[in-house]
């Protein structure tokens, strides 16, 4: 089931690359963004928004770099406290979910097996995180926050053996932008 | 790509009757060599102005709200924050001083009435210690709003900015007050 798929997914050390499309449903509007990502455990990730704006978020193990092209700003923060329960953290840290969330298997739908993660502590900011697997392949994620906003992330074009190394997660700020620490 | 022009003085005007709008985007704050970043959803409707401070993934970490009773904020765990002034509340919740009281007026290309203002050589509006400039989309909606003062600079990049009709049935006070 999905919990086995999650455990297998968490044991994986080959890394993962692919594309994502993100839909955020808030009270009166829906916002869509899309881009690409790569992950190499433990702790290395790149989450790149391409449409409708360009933004790169890189975790190199020590620092999370967030570069927003329109803002001409790179914001640096230390990795351990910066990313909390974001999808990037969940995908790049083996124990991210198990330590703070209770896991429960849910009914499968359209060939996708689901695991529901509900926070053990009440101040996690999320009501739940749901992860869907197609067999062993990560398919989608859904996060509901304390205000009722629901983020749905659909993954596609997954490469489960991307042959990544630490070098792929080096971030060098471009010239002419502010590099500021959080 | 979208053509954007730096606003010229004539694109600034006195404040019109309160503009309702709905906007979203990202904001970067620079204070000396320190910086912060947030995604935001920002709306004003029926006298209630709400700013949701979000992560890139869309979850709201804090919500600032201003109505005729004053300002208050709520975090993702439902805790409510109040303060005497909008600036003190912003400092408390965000760690920096977002000029909540006037940002909407400036974003709409208006100067705050009954306060001195003028334009510098680059055509930027100067008011209440801030230097304000906008880059506009072809439809004259703001693409970038830049607010600078002696301590800090705030840069807002709008993914979406739309003036909206007044909806009398929408709430007349911050939802966090319920």
Image (tube, rainbow, N blue to C red):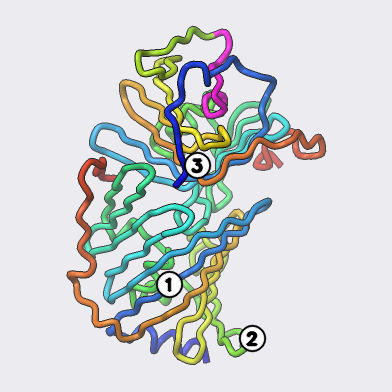
Ranked by sequence position, the earlier of labels 1 and 2 is 1
Q: Which residues are magenta?
A: B105-114
Residue shown at 38%/72% (left/top)? A96
Residue shown at 68%/51% (left/top)? A28
What is the secondary structure assignment of the residue under circle 1?
A: strand
- For disc 1, the marked residue is A19
The CA span between labels 1 and 2 is 22 Å
The chain carrying label 2 is A
- For disc 3, the marked residue is B158
Is disc 1 surrounded by few (<14), some (14 to 19) or many (20+) residues within 10 Å?
some
**Disc 3 with disc 2 on a shared chain:** no
The quadrant the C terminus of chain B occupies is top right
Determine whether B4 is above or below B85 in the image.
Answer: below
What is the secondary structure assignment of the residue under circle 2?
A: strand
User: In this rendering, which labeled residue sits more in front, label 3 or label 2?
Assistant: 3
Determine whether B90 is above or below A86 in the image.
Answer: above
Q: Outermost residue toward the right?
A: B169
Where's residue A91, x and y in %?
38, 73
Is residue B123 rendered to the left or right of residue B159?
Answer: left
Is disc 3 surrounded by few (<14), some (14 to 19) or many (20+) residues within 10 Å?
many
User: Is B110 contained in the magenta span?
Assistant: yes
- For disc 2, the marked residue is A109
Query: Closer to the camera, A13 or B104?
Result: B104
Determine whether B69 is above or below B10 in the image.
Answer: below
- Residue B34, by quadrant, is top left
Where's residue A133, x and y in %?
50, 85
Residue A59 can be seen in this image: yes
């Amino acid at each position: 089931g999905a919990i086995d798929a999650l455990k297998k997914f968490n044991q994986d050390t080959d890394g993962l690359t692919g594309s994502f499309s993100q839909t955020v449903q808030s009270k009166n509007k829906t916002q869509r963004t899309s881009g690409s990502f790569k992950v190499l455990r433990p702790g290395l990730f790149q989450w790149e928004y391409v449409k409708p704006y360009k933004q790169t978020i890189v975790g190199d193990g020590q620092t999370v770099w967030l570069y927003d092209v329109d803002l001409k700003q790179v914001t640096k923060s230390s990795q351990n406290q910066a990313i909390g329960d974001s999808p990037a953290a969940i995908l790049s840290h083996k124990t991210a979910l198990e330590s703070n969330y209770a896991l429960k298997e849910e009914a499968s739908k359209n060939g996708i097996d689901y695991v529901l993660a509900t926070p053990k502590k009440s101040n996690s900011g999320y009501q739940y995180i749901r992860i869907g697997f197609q067999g062993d392949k990560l398919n989608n994620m859904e996060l509901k926050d304390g205000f009722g906003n629901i983020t749905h992330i659909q993954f596609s074009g997954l490469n489960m053996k991307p042959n990544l190394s630490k070098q792929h997660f080096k971030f060098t700020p471009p010239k002419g932008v502010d590099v500021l620490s959080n | 790509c979208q053509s954007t022009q730096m606003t010229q003085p004539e694109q600034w005007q006195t404040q019109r009757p309160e503009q309702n709008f709905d906007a979203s985007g990202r904001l970067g704050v620079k204070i000396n060599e320190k910086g912060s970043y947030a995604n935001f959803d920002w709306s004003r409707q029926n006298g209630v102005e709400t700013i949701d401070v979000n992560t890139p993934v869309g979850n709201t970490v804090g919500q600032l709200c201003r109505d005729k009773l004053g300002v208050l904020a709520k975090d993702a765990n439902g805790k409510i924050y109040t303060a005497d002034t909008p600036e003190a509340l912003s400092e408390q919740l965000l760690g920096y001083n977002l000029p909540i009281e006037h940002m909407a007026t400036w974003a709409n290309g208006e100067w705050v009435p009954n306060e001195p203002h003028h334009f510098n050589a680059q055509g930027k509006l100067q008011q209440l210690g801030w230097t304000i400039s906008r880059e506009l989309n072809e439809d004259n909606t703001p693409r970038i709003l830049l607010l600078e003062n002696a301590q800090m600079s705030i840069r807002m990049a709008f993914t979406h900015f739309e003036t909206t009709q007044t909806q009398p049935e929408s709430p007349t006070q911050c939802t966090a007050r319920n």
